[in-house]
Each structure stands twice: as structure tokens, then as C-alpha cells.
Image: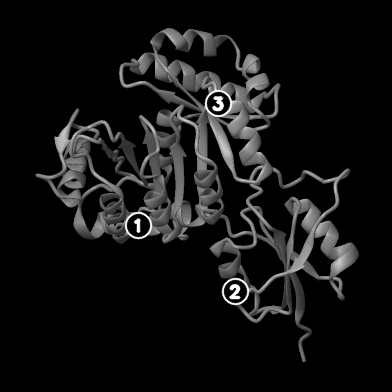
Amino acid sequence: MDKKLKILLVNDDGISSPGIVHLAEMAMQLGEVWVAAPSSQCSAMSQKLTIFQPLDVEEYDFPLPVAGAYSIGGTPADCVKTALKAVLPIRPDVVFSGINIGYNSFTYGAQILRQKQKELSFAVPWVVKLRLDSRIPDTYDSSFFASVVRTGLTYGIYSYQLRSMDHHEDMESYLAVIQSHPECAFLWFLSDTPLTEKQQKLLLSCPNLMVSLPIDAPSTASMAKALRRQKTLFGMHKVYQDADAAAYLLSFDHLYSQMEQSVFFFLVADDSCSKESIRAVSDVVQQYRFTPIQPFFPIEVQEDSRKIEQIITANPAYLLLLPDHMARTLDTPTVSFEELSLRNIFYRELLADA
């Protein structure tokens, strides 16, 4: 009789992430499964070890009948070390890690995107972007956002970006939509309006969401400390214009003192920014990632999104939904998405690429 493997599962998205449940379901076919995962989101800190603070370990009510599951108040490396040294009654034969939230966007979702393009003969973007601005009369609300996500899923779109242009008045209802789609990944660029304490706590219910704080806002340092205390994944961003681009061509190093221990730094090109400036900043971002001086990861949002698009699909597409019920695509500066369905918008994209 074949000996069953003893398997330990860990991740960096936290023990409540749907990805580790899918991994456990597959691993249970191979042997006896144990789970030891962070109690909260710990992306980009997989090799970090906690040395001077105690680690809380609690048994966790895992949704599948695994041999045992433990929620550990530390990093992924802490989880593995604690499981091996102090928690598990057995020594595992193998350790599996994952499945990350991005799996749906870049693997499963990508397969659906390619299939839909062949079946329907129109291009589909891997990410849909939305601008939120309550100052615009009759702007869309969270119910429209929910319909966009539902529609997007039918095309294999599992990634969504939001960018707040003013205060976060309706944040609770948007977070409810995000929470209801744990299979998707969301990135939210916040405005310089600080979140309330209630809004900060609500972020804990959305492990599939990363928020990004404006690096120059007066409230960012205190907001970052609060989010870090509650172990919410966050990044920093800067909306840059042509005049700002030259500064980033010189060095990113001066930004590190403002990063508040955040790992991700997003560079968001202003609408007025020229393609030349965007490409120049993107080139510097690429160089910095290969030869980093400070421990953070810069991302030029527009160019990096385009490069991901080229990897996922042969027919590039772009969709930005604006708060005035207009949309931007590759081939049109603006188009009304009340007059055109998503299908027709994507069909126009494919025609533009032909």
C-alpha cells in the first residue's frame, strides 16, 4: 500500500483566502493535509521572520476536513517555522504554498479570456479600471460596480482597479461588492481624504483588496501606521505629470523615507501625461527592479498593465470607466457605455487592433 504524503500548506494571502482552500482541496487527494497560515494578509513578506514579538497561534475552523488548521499571527516564514517546531504532531514530507489571489487573473481567468476571444471574435482586457467621483452629477454607484464585476467574470476578467478622485463616501457599499467576490483581485487608489476608523476596520473583511495611499497626502503617514497595525495590505502611489517625470528619472531612492514600510510604489500617469514621459518613467522602473537600492517595488501602472495584457492575450484591450458615464478604450478617447454594451466596446477594441 502506498504511503500517503503528509502535507503542510502555507500562503501569504492569509488563512481566510479562498486560494488556500482550493489548494487544500487538491492536496487532500495526495495525502494528509495540515494548514498553518498567517492570520492576516502578508504579501511581499514571505521570508521575513518575527524575532522580538510573540506569535499568537489559534486553531482555525477550516472549511474542509483537513487534519488540522492553525491561524498564526506572523509571516509565512513564521508559520512554517512555528508549525515544524511547536504545533504539528508530525513532520511533513512536503510544504505547498498558495494559491495566490492573482491565480484567477493570470492563469484561470487568462484561459477564459483567450477562449472568449476565439468564440466571440472580440478583444477582452485582463483588468477593468473605474474612476470614482461623487462630485459628478448622476455618477454611477456601487450597484453599477457590482454589475461590471458580474459581467466581467463571464468574460474571464478577475482583476479590477478603482481610483477615488474625492472623499470615500460610499466606500462601505463598494467594499461589500469586493467582499462578495473573493475569487477576484482588487486594487483601490485612495484619494488624500483620510479613511475613518470604521472604514479602516472594514478593509479587514476584504483580503482580496490592496489599497494604495497617495504618498504626498498629509494624512498618509498616520493612515499607513494604522493599516500596518491591523495588518492590512497597502501600497503607496503618486499621480505624476510630465513635469514630475524628470524627478523619477533621476532616482527613486529619495522616496523610501516616505514609504512607511510599504513594499509597493505605484506610479500613476496623469491624463495629461505624454506617452514619451510614461515610457521614460517605465524604463527607469524596469531598471530599478533589476538593481534595487531600497527594499520596495516600483510599478508604472499604465505600461506594466499593458505588458501583462500582451502576455495574457494576443489582442490587447483597455477599458477605463469614467464617473460621467463615459469610457476610454484603445481606439477612442471617450465613448458612452450607456449607449454601447461591454461586448460592443470590446468588439471595437478588436477592430482597432486589426
Which sits earlier in the primary sequence, circle 2 or circle 3?
A: 2
Look at the numbered disc 3 and give the secondary structure of its residue.
loop
195 lies left or right of 60: left
Which disc is residue 219 wearing?
3
Q: Nearer the viewer, mark 2 or mark 3?
A: 3
Residue for badge 2:
26
Element class at badge 2 = helix
Q: CA distance from mark 2 to mark 3?
A: 44 Å
Q: Which label's residue is closer to the chain start, 1 or 2?
A: 2
Q: State which tag comes first along the sequence, 3 or 1.
A: 1
Res 17 visible = yes
Can you identify the residue that label 1 sits on?
156
At label 1, which amino acid type do we have? Gly
From what the image shows, is residue 165 above or below residue 4?
Answer: above
Look at the numbered discs 1 and 2 and tell me whether their residues touch, using CB distance below 8 Å: no
The picture quadrant where one finds residue 99 is bottom right
Q: Is 8 rendered above or below residue 127?
A: below
Residue type of the residue flagged with mark 2: Met
Residue 173 pos. (x, y %): 37, 52
The x, y position of residue 347, in whole percent, is: 17, 46
- The number of numbered discs placed on residues in the rendered structure image is 3
Residue 275 numbered tag: none
